Image (cartoon, grey):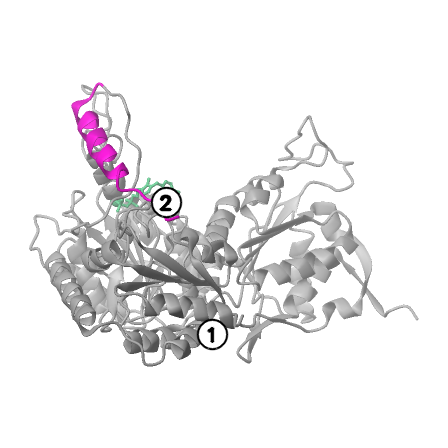
Amino acid sequence: MPAETVRLTTAQALVRFLAAQHSERDGNEQRLIPGVWGIFGHGNVAGLGQALLQAAQTGEADLPYYLARNEQAMVHAAAAYAKMKNRLQAFACTASTGPGSTNMITGAALATTNRLPVLLLPSDMFASRVPDPVLQQLEDTRAGDVSVNDAFRPVSKYFDRVSRPEQLIPAALAAMRVLTDPVETGAVTLCLPQDVQAEAFDWPREFFRRRVWRVGRVAPEPAAVERVSALLRSAEKPLIVAGGGVVYGEAEAELRAFAEATGIPVADTHAGKGAVPWDHPAAVGGLGSTGTSAANALAAEADVVLGIGTRYSDFTTASHTVFGNPDVTFANLNVARLDAAKHSAEMLLADAKTGIAALAKALDGWSVADEYRAETRRLAEEWQAKADACFDLGHGPLPAQTEILGALNAALDDSDVVINAAGSMPGDLQMLWRARDPKAYNVEYAFSCMGYEIAAGVGTKMAAPEREVVVLVGDGSYLMLASEIATMVSEGLKVIIVIVQNHGFASIGSLSESLGSQRFGTKYRYRDEKSGLLDGDVLPVDLAANAASFGAEVIKADSVATFRDAIAKAKANDRTTVVHVETDLTGPNPPGSAWWEVPVSEVSELDSTRAAYAAYTDHKRDQRHYL
Ligand SMILES: Cc1ncc(C[n+]2csc(CCOP(=O)(O)OP(=O)(O)O)c2C)c(N)n1
Ligand SMILES: [Mg+2]
């Protein structure tokens, strides 16, 4: 007997399907796709747009629609949401053909590099190829089936183009499989030609049944546990590197207990911050190029490094210089073989929670020497004294950024979330921010994308309405993508946005200076007639007025004291509040203790560049392959 069918358009079928998907881990079930972000154009207004309207009006599928102002921003909002939800939920994003869709590519790359699930639904050219070329069509002369959407391929963990309605069935199922796979997850792209979206088909009803995608937990192989625990037992100066996998795997309790029992110090990456509270006896803070002196000193001597849920980004390893012991060996606990195998490590393939529990059992009764515990504490306290000094510089006439960060950190509760992505703040935050809650620190630092911050505020507040959400955004990032403040206002999302105004790029400016490039092109200034360079007067750009124009309340501050007052007012407010604070573009920066490789010109007419090149070659000598 033929299976029972229902006649729907491809878009109506997709909406019904998405509303029926769930994820489950540790017995907790939730909607996998809680809603759809979008901006309509001719590519999706009549297809997916009609399907979403019909779902809302008839109640045949529950899939709320959210209107963004920029397609890149809506993907950032989706990624931030998934990050808050430990990758168990993912938003869909629909965009029109051409620019609407290509605007999502940066968001896709961010999601994929950060291993965060987002479902992208770019509209595509007519599958029929009768209207040809339509508005915004690429017209590749070498191939009839290429569209701008092919640019999604390298930035997507799964890519498909639904050229006939029934192709949606395998494509949609594959998309859900990849979204819910902690190893594979990232941006998942289903291209939807505009005619196919509106075309009807007799769908098997079974396609729309309630589905639960089991995320599960991968248990480690006993022999691998044996090998890794033997390696740790042999260590005198072991060090844990805690990455995002600890947070996404909800393994905080296991890691804290393991660190206490064994005394192995824990350094963290951006994605792992907060898994172990900053004042835990084993905590030594951020590792690498923007790490603390405590973590970097321990890394320099460590004989065994246990990476847990980390992808060992270039920042984390200080461009392969931070682990300095000639005999250092690695053991990596990770769900992904890609990461477990890094640095020629002994691999422990498991999720962080089950993996740490297995190691704790195997190492029961074993601990590092008391002297090593004492050394860890001494280094951590030494670092915290340096951080305290950064918070209290009395710098003037404008405050230093570190003082503003210190005041903010002190004013927030443990559960309040801070968001950032690019500029000088991620480095300062990795060194200085004191987090006690793994969800309280949302710094996107795989793609470090200017423009993530405000959009991420939207997604984070949607994911955690009970938490105070604070976006830290530089003036450069603000100028790139501030438009989602309008979305916050229209959705009634209370977010605090702190605009750190320093009239340029503090980050790339100080990097430029250290590389002998004299801060060239890193200030927002009028072009000076004499020099011909952008080093004239400060521009009259008024970001506070700009933020107010979106309907947010704005408070201005120009000192640590007025900033404290502004934050107190912002916390008491019940609507989106922007705190605009002026800081010194030139720091001072917190004390660094590691390198980051940025190549310097090998030949130059400039003395500053030649000096920087000499320093660069010195550092290059410390680089290791970890074989
Ligand atoms: C989309 C994007 N473009 C360029 C960069 C390179 N970049 C990194 S930081 C930075 C300047 C950031 O300026 P601002 O937001 O004012 O922060 P500040 O450096 O002043 O703290 C630039 C251009 C980037 N990370 N992302
Ligand atoms: Mg700036």
Q: Residue 437, position in %: x, y?
A: 32, 71
Q: In the rendered view, does 146 fall on the left or right side of 166? A: left
Q: In the rendered view, does 348 fall on the left or right side of 243? A: right
Q: Residue 407, position in %: x, y?
A: 17, 63
Secondary structure under tag 2 reads loop
Residue 624, above or below 183: above
Is 614 a magenta residue?
yes
Q: Residue 265, position in %: x, y?
A: 27, 67
Q: Residue 163, position in %: x, y?
A: 75, 47
Q: Quadrant of the N terminus?
A: bottom right
The answer to whether one can see residue 612 in this image is: yes
What's under tag 1, amino acid-wise? Answer: Thr
**Which badge, 1 or 2, comes first in the chain's sequence?**
1
Q: Mark 1 packing: few (<14 Cα in 10 Å), some, or many (20+)?
A: some
Kindly identify which residue carries mark 1.
354
What's under tag 2, amino acid-wise? Answer: His
Q: Which mark is residue 625?
A: 2
Q: Nearer the viewer, mark 1 or mark 2?
A: 2
Q: In the rendered view, does 160 fall on the left or right side of 584? A: right
Question: Which quarter of the rendered image does ligand 1 occupy?
Answer: top left
The answer to whether one can see residue 541 in this image is: no
The magenta segment = 605-627
| Label 1 with label 2: CB-CB less than 8 Å | no
Secondary structure under tag 1 reads helix
Locate residue 49: give its quadrant.
bottom right
